[in-house]
Image (spheres, grey):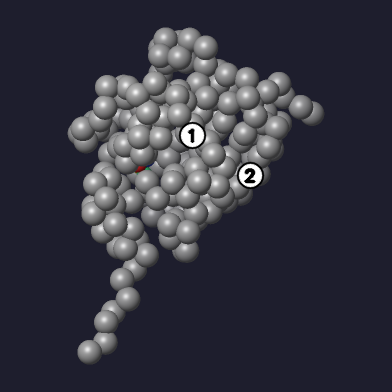
Amino acid sequence: MTVEPISQRRFFFRQAKKDGFAARSVYKLEEINQRDRLIRKGSIILDLGCAPGSWLQYAAKQVGPNGRIVGVDPTPVTVSLPSHVHVIQGDMYALHPDEIRKWAPDGFHLVMSDAAPKTTGIPFADHARSVELARRSLELAIALLRPGGSWLAKVFQGEDLPPLRDEARKRFRKFMERKPKSSRDRSVEVFLVGIGFGRPTE
Ligand SMILES: C[S@@+](CC[C@H](N)C(=O)[O-])C[C@H]1O[C@@H](n2cnc3c(N)ncnc32)[C@H](O)[C@@H]1O
C-alpha cells in the first residue's frame, strides 16, 4: 500500500488541532520567536489581525500572567483566552493609536501583525493590499512601541515591498526577513522583523 504524503498545509492544520490552537499560523510565530526571541515573560504585545486567535493563545502563554496582549480584528475571536488578553473587535485602519495606548501607557514591547487581505486571486491586488496592511502595522508600531521594542509583520512579496522594507530598516537597530518552514513553500508570504526600535536613521 502506498501512503500519500500529506501537504505541508494539512500537516500543520492537523497539528494545530491536536495542540489545541485556533490556526496553523501559530507555528510561524513559534518558529520566528524561537529564533529572534521577540516575546518574553511580562511582555506587552499588540497583535493586529488576531482572529481566529492562535497567536493570542501562544503569546498569552509566553508572556505569562504578568504580561498583557491586545488583539485587533474585525472578525470576532471565539477561542477562550486568559484574562491578560484583551480583544478589540475592529479595523486597524479605523483605530486611533490613542484608543490602543491606554492598554500600554509606557508603550508596547512588540507590535505584531499577521493581518491578511481577503484574497481576490489577482496577485498584484492581493500583494498591494497586504503591503498596505503591513504599512499600517508599522505606523501603529511607530506610534505605540517603547524604545527598543520590536515589530513583526507578514507581507506578500512583490514590487511594492522594497519601499516598505527601506522605511522599516530606518526605524530599527536590526532588520530581517524570515520565511518560516511552516509557511508553505509556494507561499509568497514573508515576515518582516524589526528589533530595537529607535529614532529614524538616514
Ligand atoms: C491569517 S489571519 C490571522 C491569523 C491569526 N494570527 C491567528 O493566529 O489566529 C488574518 C486576519 O487578518 C485580519 N484582517 C484583515 N484586515 C484587517 C484590518 N484592516 N484590521 C484588522 N485585522 C484585519 C482578518 O480578519 C484575519 O482574521
Instruction: In this rendered view, identify the residue nearer to me: 132 or 192.
Output: 192
Q: Which mark is residue 176?
A: 2
Element on which disc 2 rests: strand
Q: Quadrant of the N terminus?
A: bottom left
**Residue 170 seen:** yes
At which x and y percent is residue 44? 45, 23
Q: Quadrant of ligand 1?
A: top left
At which x and y percent is residue 71? 36, 27
Density class for disc 1 (Cα within 10 Å; few <14, some 14-19, many ≥20) is many
**Residue occupying image coordinates x 37% and y 48%:** 25
Instruction: Identify residue type, mark 2.
Output: Met
* Mark 1, residue position: 39
At which x and y percent is residue 88? 31, 22
Q: Find out whether the residues at labels 1 and 2 contact each other: C-beta distance under 8 Å.
A: no
**Residue 117 seen:** no
Return the residue found at the far right.
202
Q: Nearer the viewer, mark 1 or mark 2?
A: 1
Return the residue found at the far bottom.
1
| Residue 62 falls in image quadrant | top left
